């Protein structure tokens, strides 16, 4: 149940803040009008957003394409090849032993969030990832659906706007929350990894061919056609995340990963039958960095912990992406005041057990380690600290995501009033952060209070008596504000 119920109107709230009449946060939502049937058909090409989310020409984070180069994902700390590059063999062996001991000890002791049934939920949510018979990530998809040629017809033809509206509807039907679209131009190509995070470590190559393919050494992206990157976000369970530190939090994340594998496969088959290709990579973090693709295509804004924070779902998402030759209409970046708000908040930094997320007021261009790709002015996370602590907490954490002011179910109308105010002025950012603390949102855990110090989330057991919605999420979020 939400801790904060309110019958305060938007106007009364603005009056209390002393900004009524200042033109801030009081815009009315205009109903959509269409001049003809084509306008109605293509209206779904642009995502329908709350009135307080503005389109922008550039993402709100500063970046410099001239400094960005294609990155080898084998360098990141959550790659099996990452730790040996940045941590001594002895230190990583120590971290892994602590993790193994913690897992055994916490299960045996029945620690809250780390009981046998909690572990079973986490393993079940993974769904046997990588096992025969389980829907898995793949470069070209199952390739079982018929092509237009086999059906005796020609490929689907529509305008980019019509195709985008069609694809968004199909993805929502398959289970996704939203999509963002980028043209794969010379700059966006720089975001495509050279090598993936996990095996098989084949190279991503651009070749002057008509069709993408793979062989024993490479995954090939065709260069002869105009291509688009489709970033797909799906919700994770806030009920799972708010039990963190726990295996239910990990289950909430991996449940979305498992569902995303099916969504991608369904989309690849959908596009195949329309007569188009969809290249999606072989694992959950394939092709390139999700936060970059998501922020540039308007699904959210980059935030302090270097993830993408969405206006509707907060950080409760997992993202996947695919490359297609279906003509699409790119979606623009957004400005909802999120990046600006992060300058004044830092709740994620306060909750970070390893203190890997900077507390500084201002972001920086300075890159702290080779596990990062330069070219953006952000709060670079110390990947060694983060991944080492996640490992010792038996493979995951999620406290930065749970602590976020945007991690809310939004049942109380006051939350959208707060977000609409944040989008238009930064004057009240500190006030909203403090009010979030006062109302008990976020998490009580942090560097001095966590399972590594013997402190567990006693409320984690409540997860098992909740009236859980399907997949642990409210699928109406993202629609009710339109």
Image (tube, rainbow, N blue to C red):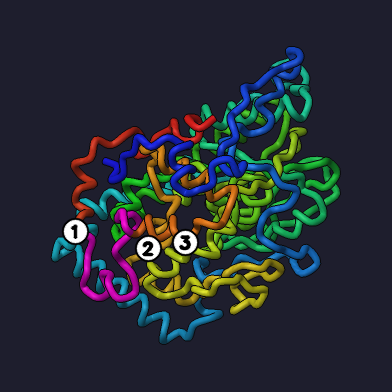
Measuring from the top left, give residue 243's x and y in whole percent.
28, 54
Give above or below for 184 relative to 273.
below
Q: Is residue 416 left or right of residue 63?
A: left
Quadrant in which the N terminus is drawn: top left
Residue at mark 3 to residue at mark 1: CA–CA distance:
29 Å
Q: Quadrant of residue 47?
A: top right
Tell whether label 2 touches label 3 (CB within 8 Å).
no
Which residue shows up at 22% across the image and 69% down it? 455
Task: Assess whether mark 1 and mark 3 are in contact (beta carbons under 8 angstroms).
Answer: no
Q: Is residue 7 left or right of residue 168?
A: left
- SS assignment at label 2: loop
Q: Which residues are magenta?
A: 438-457
Q: Quadrant of the C terminus?
A: top right
Q: Look at discs 2 and 1 and give the one toward the viewer.
A: 1
Residue nearest the observer in this picture, 182 or 73: 182
307 on left or right of 465: right
Tell me if residue 409 comes above or below residue 76 in the rendering. above
Provide the secondary structure element on which disc 3 rests: helix
Residue placed under numbered mark 3 in the picture? 430
Instruction: Indicate the quadrant where residue 211 lies.
Output: top right
Residue 282: image x %, image y %?
57, 50
Q: Is residue 29 left or right of residue 355?
A: right
Nearest the eye: 92 or 201: 92
In terms of sequence position, does the residue under pointer 3 or pointer 2 come before the other? 2
Q: Is residue 473 magenta?
A: no
The number of numbered badges drawn on the structure is 3
Q: Main secondary structure of the magenta part?
A: loop
* Circle 1 residue: 458
């Amino acid at each position: 149940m939400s801790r904060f119920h309110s019958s305060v109107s938007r106007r009364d709230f603005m009056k209390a803040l002393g900004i009524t009449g200042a033109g801030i946060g009081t815009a009315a939502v205009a109903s959509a009008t269409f001049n003809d049937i084509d306008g109605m058909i293509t209206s779904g090409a642009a995502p329908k957003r709350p009135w307080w989310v503005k389109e922008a020409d550039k993402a709100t984070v500063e970046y410099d394409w001239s400094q960005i180069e294609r990155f080898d994902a084998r360098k990141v700390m959550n790659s099996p090849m990452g730790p040996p590059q940045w941590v001594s063999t002895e230190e990583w062996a120590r971290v892994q032993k602590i993790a193994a001991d913690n897992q055994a000890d916490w299960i045996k002791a029945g620690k809250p969030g780390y009981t046998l049934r909690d572990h079973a939920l986490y393993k079940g949510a993974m769904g046997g990832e990588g096992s025969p018979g389980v829907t898995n990530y793949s470069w070209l998809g199952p390739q079982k659906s018929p092509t237009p040629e086999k059906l005796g017809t020609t490929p689907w033809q529509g305008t980019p706007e019509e195709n985008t509206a069609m694809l968004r509807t199909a993805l929502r039907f398959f289970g996704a929350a939203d999509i963002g679209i980028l043209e794969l131009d010379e700059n966006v190509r720089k975001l495509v990894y050279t090598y993936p995070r996990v095996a098989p470590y084949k190279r991503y190559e651009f070749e002057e061919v008509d069709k993408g393919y793979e062989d024993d050494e490479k995954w090939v992206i065709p260069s002869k056609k105009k291509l688009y990157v489709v970033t797909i976000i799906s919700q994770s369970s806030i009920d799972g995340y708010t039990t963190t530190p726990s295996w239910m939090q990990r289950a909430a994340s991996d449940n979305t990963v498992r569902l995303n594998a099916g969504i991608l496969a369904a989309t690849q088959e959908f596009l195949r039958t329309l007569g188009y290709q969809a290249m999606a990579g072989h694992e959950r973090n394939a092709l390139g960095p999700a936060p970059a693709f998501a922020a540039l295509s308007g699904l959210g804004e980059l935030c302090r912990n270097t993830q993408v924070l969405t206006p509707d779902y907060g950080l409760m998402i997992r993202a996947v992406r695919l490359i297609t030759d279906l003509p699409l209409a790119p979606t623009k970046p957004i400005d909802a005041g999120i990046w600006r708000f992060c300058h004044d908040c830092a709740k994620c930094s306060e909750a970070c057990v390893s203190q890997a997320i900077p507390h500084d007021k201002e972001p920086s261009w300075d890159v702290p380690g080779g596990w990062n790709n330069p070219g953006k002015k952000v709060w670079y996370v110390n990947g060694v600290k983060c991944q080492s602590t996640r490992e010792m907490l038996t493979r995951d954490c999620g406290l930065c995501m749970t602590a976020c002011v945007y991690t809310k179910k939004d049942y109380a109308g006051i939350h959208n009033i707060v977000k609409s105010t944040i989008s238009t002025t930064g004057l009240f950012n500190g006030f909203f952060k403090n009010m979030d603390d006062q109302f008990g949102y976020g998490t009580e855990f942090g560097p001095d209070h966590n399972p590594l110090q013997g402190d567990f989330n006693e409320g984690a057991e409540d997860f098992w008596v909740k009236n859980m919605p399907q997949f642990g999420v409210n699928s109406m979020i993202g629609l009710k504000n339109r």
